[in-house]
Amino acid sequence: MSRGGEEIHTGKDRTVIEPMNHAEEDGVVIESLDHIEENTEPTDRAAEDAAVTESMSFVGSSSPDASDEQVPQKPGPMPSLPDEPAPVVPTAPPAEPQPVTPNTEPVPQPLVTEPDGGLSVGRVDVGGTDSGDLLELEDDPAAQLLGLEEALPEGEGPDRPYRIAVFASGTGSNFQALLDASRAGRLGAQIALLVCDKPQAKAVERAKAAGVPVFAFTPKEYDSREAYERIILSELERAKIDLIVLAGYMRLITSVLVEPYEGRMINIHPSLLPAFPGKDAPLQAIEHGVRVSGVTVHFVDGGMDTGPIIAQRAVEVMQEDTAIELQARIQDMERLLYPEVVSWFAAGRVKLEGRRVILF
């Protein structure tokens, strides 16, 4: 049986398709495609592919009755695959620069009193200053702050430090202890003024070195104690002093200062009051043969070391002590106790009821 140049042999177990021109290899009938290539002249690539596919469809195919027996074919070489192109990684576009938003917040300005008593924003002005002074004031933040506080109504405005004025007549060792405590942050108050009745005293030098304002005066140049105390009072009011701290001030205080600062004026004394008031307290302790002396911080009431007692610290009197040696140890205790007591006032922990002082 033949079909299109092929012979078909049908047996009992299989059907074999043999081309007219064929070759046998290892007992397997393989169709030669030479005659196809010689005799076929496809007009295009698609026709050629169709012819090859049709001729190969008969090779190794089995009839439905011989599905259990396959005709093996000799594999040809695997065609090489083209190299895959490297993946292209897209690059992110450069970030666009963000626009800069200018700061439009207004710069705070100090408040200035107006003639009608109101407040306006602008330059701090001080009466009696010329244009040069105003220019210098604009560059001084401290002066601007002071001008702001003076422009605000009484009791209003930002919290300001608790202000003290120290009165001294001599070397100012307790004044220096207060300065040191303030710098260390243990005082809780600002030393805003030093008042001294001896312009050449060491205490004045200490204040100037620390930048503390000084009011120094010579009592003999005034008609009376009340006369210079009225001037002192005006300085205290101008500096807005909250507490007067007497530290070795060797003058009696009259009612000119005591009454306006009642309950806000304190003194330190080198003995355990009421024992040994007045001058030379360490010498009095040695002469009386006491075993214990010490330090007392008390309110000032116009008398000689008679005000209500705030705090006391004891200092032992040694058998071989002289007045100078005892005084030195008492002064060491004073330099510890006085800053501590001032810090109590700055923190609002002291309350006076009659002669009784309550700490809370």
Image (cartoon, rainbow, N blue to C red):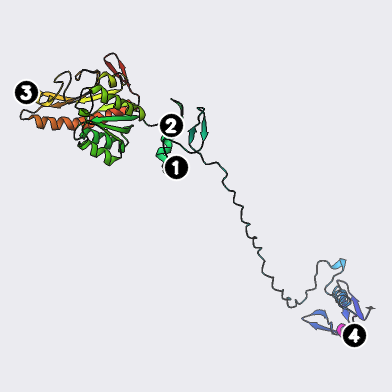
The question of residue 43 being in magenta is answered with no
Local crowd size for mark 4, using a 10 Å CA cut-off: few (<14), some (14–19), many (≥20): few
Q: Secondary structure at mark 3?
A: helix
Quarter of the figure with residue 147: top left
State the mark number for residue 39.
Answer: 4
Q: Find out whether the residues at labels 4 and 1 contact each other: C-beta distance under 8 Å.
A: no
Task: Report how far apart the C-alphas of labels 4 and 3 lie in the structure.
Answer: 151 Å
> At numbered mark 4, what does the secondary structure look like: helix, strand or loop?
helix
SS for dot 1: helix
Front disc: 3 or 2: 2
Query: Which amino acid type corresponds to the residue marked 4 in the rendered image?
Result: Asn
Residue type marked 1: Ser
Q: Residue at x 43, y 32 (%)?
A: 149
Give me the C-alpha separation between circle 3 and circle 2. Answer: 53 Å
Residue at (28, 22) in percent of width and height: 257
Residue 287: numbered disc: 3
Q: Which residue is mark 2?
A: 149
* Amino acid at the residue labelled 3: Glu
Q: Which mark is residue 131?
A: 1
Residue closest to the eye, 226 or 14 = 226
Quadrant the N terminus occupies: bottom right
Q: Are marks 2 and 4 in contact (CB under 8 Å)?
A: no
Marks 1 & 3, CB-CB < 8 Å contact: no
The reply, left or right, for residue 39 in relation to residue 184 is: right
Task: Find residue 203 and report its horizontal and vertical position in percent.
Answer: 22, 36
Q: Which residues are magenta?
A: 36-42
Q: CA distance from mark 4 to mark 1?
A: 119 Å
